[in-house]
Amino acid sequence: MASIPTPAEVMDQERHISDNLVPNIIATNAVCFTIACIAVILRFEARRLSRVKYEADDWLIVGGLFFTLGVVICSLLGIRYGSGRHAILMKNPAAYAKLLISAEVVYSFAITLIKGSLLYLYNRVFFVSRSFRITSWVVAIFIACYSVTQIFASIFQCVPIDANWKIGVPHYCANSGLGGTIIAALNVFTDFVILIMPMPLLYKLQTPLRKKIQVMGMFLLGGL
């Protein structure tokens, strides 16, 4: 919800008016997105060199990268409106609020596609285990459900929607802090579930323990 900083907040921001996180925002986005692009390119190059056909999980990760680019663009555009500086220096609060909501929605799509890519890959690798495939579908449906919930919660966190950037509009706003915490917890939980899902099957491989640990490590690294 749009709000005016209190006098105490204004004074505190004025005392630290030179604070500037813009370089951090630019560097973080540039480094992380570059690493993501390299990882996807290497994935496709490995497929090409191995003469293995591209599968749905490959295209899902491309979709995830595309939406991740959308998040990066929103983050960098936010700098134009005052992101990285104190609120009293914000040039266009309404545009920034709209951009923030857009970033939250695009982020939900990115996360869903990336996790979906991993789960589809698991289904291809461990297709012999019916229970594993059922588990992966249950996890996928759970992720899709809370992602849709997150999208609607981001858009309609305040009703009417323009109460997010207009001051004095009669409105009702949900507790966005609590909602953000719940979604973050669900994201971490599903990340953990996806990472450990293949471990029991890998441990049952008829190979030396050292080899098992190496394979499990590769899956964990790939999941990260």
Image (cartoon, helix red, strand yellow):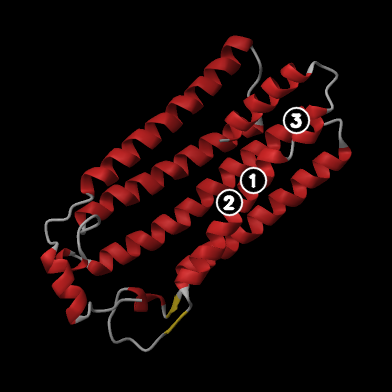
- Residue position for label 2: 188
Density class for disc 1 (Cα within 10 Å; few <14, some 14-19, many ≥20) is: few
Q: Quadrant of the C terminus?
A: top right
Q: CA distance from mark 2 to mark 3?
A: 24 Å
All told, the count of numbered labels is 3
Density class for disc 2 (Cα within 10 Å; few <14, some 14-19, many ≥20) is: few
- Residue position for label 1: 192
Q: CA distance from mark 1 to mark 3?
A: 20 Å
Q: Quadrant of residue 214?
A: top right
Amino acid type indicated by mark 1: Phe
Q: Residue at x 72, y 50 (%)?
A: 139
> In terms of sequence position, does the residue under pointer 2 or pointer 3 come before the other?
3
Q: Are marks 1 and 2 in contact (CB under 8 Å)?
A: yes
Q: CA distance from mark 1 to mark 2?
A: 6 Å
State the residue lying farthest toward the front. Answer: 209
Secondary structure at numbered mark 2 = helix
- Residue position for label 3: 124
Q: Are marks 1 and 3 in contact (CB under 8 Å)?
A: no
